[in-house]
Amino acid sequence: MSRGKALSALGALLALVLVAWLWWGSDGADGATAADASSQRPVVSVPGSAASNSLGGETVGVPYSAAGLKARQEQLVLWRGRHERAEQILASYRDSTRYPYDSRPIAEHPDQVHPFAPIAEQVKLRNANGEVVKGINLRTTQERVFLSGAESVRFTITAVDDADRILPLIIRNASAQSIPDSRTPIRIIQTAVAFTDDGAGADDVPSDGRYAGRLAPATQGFQHYNGTIRLLAEVASDSQQGVAHFDVVYAPDAPATWAGVREALEAGSLNFYAKATVRQAGRYVVSGRVDDANGVPFALVQFNDEVAAGSREFRLQVFGALVVDKRPAFPLRLRDVEGFLLIPDKFPDRATMARQVGVVHTSAVYPLSRFSSAEWTSEERQRYLAEYGKDADTARRQVEDLGGK
Amino acid sequence: MRSVRLTLSRLRPARVAASLVAVLAFAAVGVYATNYSLWINGRSSTAQGGNHADFSYWGPASTAAGVNKKSVNWDGFSRVADQNYRIRDALDCYCTGTNWCYIAAHSAGNLQIGYALSLYGGTARNKKNATPNAAGQCGNTDGTTQTGWNIKWVDVAAGAGGGSELANVGSWAVSDPLTSDLKTATARALYDHNQTRSKWFYMYAGAKGTLYSAVLPGQDDEAVAYHSAGGVSGSGGAGFCNPSDWFCNDLTLGTAANEGGKAKWSYHTVAFRDDAESLNHYTNGNWGGVVSKVRADMAANAN
């Protein structure tokens, strides 16, 4: 058989298979069966129906049994649900991808507006047996979870009752210790951490009931350690004793250092370029917040890409359409910039760059007319819009074929 | 052939022609669009890493749980970062090229898919052939890449994306590396939970919790509290409950901010809240607990 004839025969065979599939396909969702290998079945076959042959709007007028009617109604409910979900997903995706993923409205990232705010938590005090001590809670803060190089981390502990009134507190002992993160034994490093409420050192207000301590791993024995450091503080309040736990993840070396910011208005968008001297090549994840001239948080700008060693720039883009849509007051202010080297498939998975706290760059003033209103385009976006659109269209046609509106 | 002839007689010629063209197009390029359902486990001591056919974490493999279901199987013990390659390998296998995926995750599996999407969701991925080797890795198709994966949506049962207070106090009688990631402060700092690349996370939250109710704030399923299972943003420790509890803020259904004003992470919506307080955290080897609700949704809608 010639190659052309073989292809023709194959095509005809596949066409017959497709037609048979269109005709006989059921809508069972049991992934364990080979029959489920197909995707997005265009036909709903209703078990128990004498006329389960709705196809492309074409129906045969054979009456349904009672069971068939019930099954058809169930199918209609199912497809209406799928249609509603598919339309919602399509509309949401289309709207959200008007801007690229690295230039987003800050409202979409509510817990990223103030990334350097201490992490505040409240837990019930537990005694040595692990039992909850009624009426005593520990309110804690820790400045950060991930840190590198010469960075330090501040912790606070306050005892409060169930009405949030501050209770007397004693920190009996506090120490930080390296924690193995695998089955491989490690050398234990341990150091004391002083907690005080005297307004000195880590503590900012004397005698307010809030005790504070600071851990600086590089100067407290962890300068060659890479991993989890756990701080345990033994506390006592109202003659009850318990423990407060904190974990931080430390990397001894900062992978890159900051070297200023420049800006450029390019292709209708404002780009901040955060300069850095990159010591360790790899994938860097950088985030910054952009406020308008009135200090109102406006955008979250991010960078996530491979970077070579040397003098480099991380582009943080304020997308043109985002400016056109939200109309922020200029100049814009880039603040609270953070970055880390992302290390795949191992722990710790990152080495952080030093935090840049506060405003690190103020833009020039640009008229709105210099920004592009064009929405983001990319292969990824087109791929998703096509697939989500197909899903919505398929579900809509199924609802129509089943007699729904 | 008789049935086929009857079928053909009912078809419109234009549709037959269009179908034939589509089939020939597929035959010419040798690719077929296939949908898959990927199940990402949580804490486990038995998961067989990279074995996509092993459903022992979940329940009988014969149970319907979405089209072409695959079990992602990371070790359920190590740090999220250590094992995230298992998730990325599976996403590369089944969710690239012409293939698309529905994702179901349980407990710490929530952290795994969230971490993958937030930190690696915009990276270049090789298009794979959906035929894994023993390590759970697939071969390339045509040597080209695409940005991110093809994911339709994500169902999350008893999500631990926000961590658990049990990990904070060490109530889980183990000290595996994963427990460190499940501390609430660590879990919430691990990645930007709002960055799902616009994929919707449908959150299913159970509330049959009594054993650790003194440790877990608000309603819980015996392992995670509503603040995590419901995708609530911000610090952990906040208590959220069912509407029947007058002394605690409600976890709201859908995307709306919760009672008291705390927002959910973007692209997170509470699809199920256990008002009957009848579902706990655990699969019990039979697709049990709140996983039963996700399984039902996957069986019905991952098609």
Image (cartoon, rainbow, N blue to C red):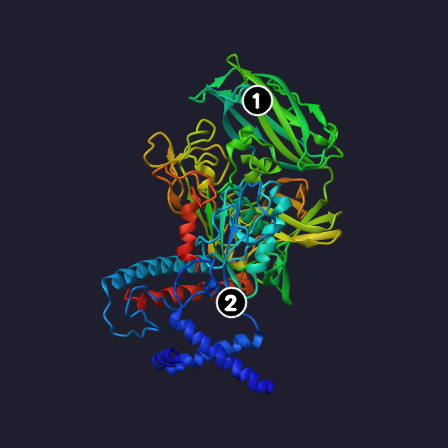
Which of the numbered marks, if any, corresponds to residue B33? 2
Please name the residue shown 54% across and 66% down the image. B98
Pick out the residue farthest to the front. Answer: B1
Residue under disc 2 on the same chain as residue under disc 1: no
Q: Can you say which quadrant of the picture contains the C terminus of chain B?
A: bottom left
Q: Can residue A16 be seen in this view?
A: yes
Q: Percent from the top left, x then y, of residue B172?
A: 54, 31
* Rendered position, B38 above or below B172: below
Please name the residue shown 28% across and 69% down the image. A50
Q: Quadrant of residue B272?
A: top left
A203 relative to A135 in the view: left or right: right
Q: Quadrant of residue A245?
A: top right
Which of the numbered marks, if any, corresponds to residue A243? 1
Marks 2 and 1, Cα distance to the nearest angstrom?
A: 55 Å
Query: Mark 2: which secondary structure?
Result: loop
* Rendered position, B98 above or below A111: below
Query: Mark 1: which secondary structure?
Result: strand
Judge by depth and name the residue closer to the eye, A160 or A331: A160
Q: Percent from the top left, x then y, of residue B257?
A: 40, 42
* Rendered position, B159 above or below B218: below
The chain letter under disc 2 is B
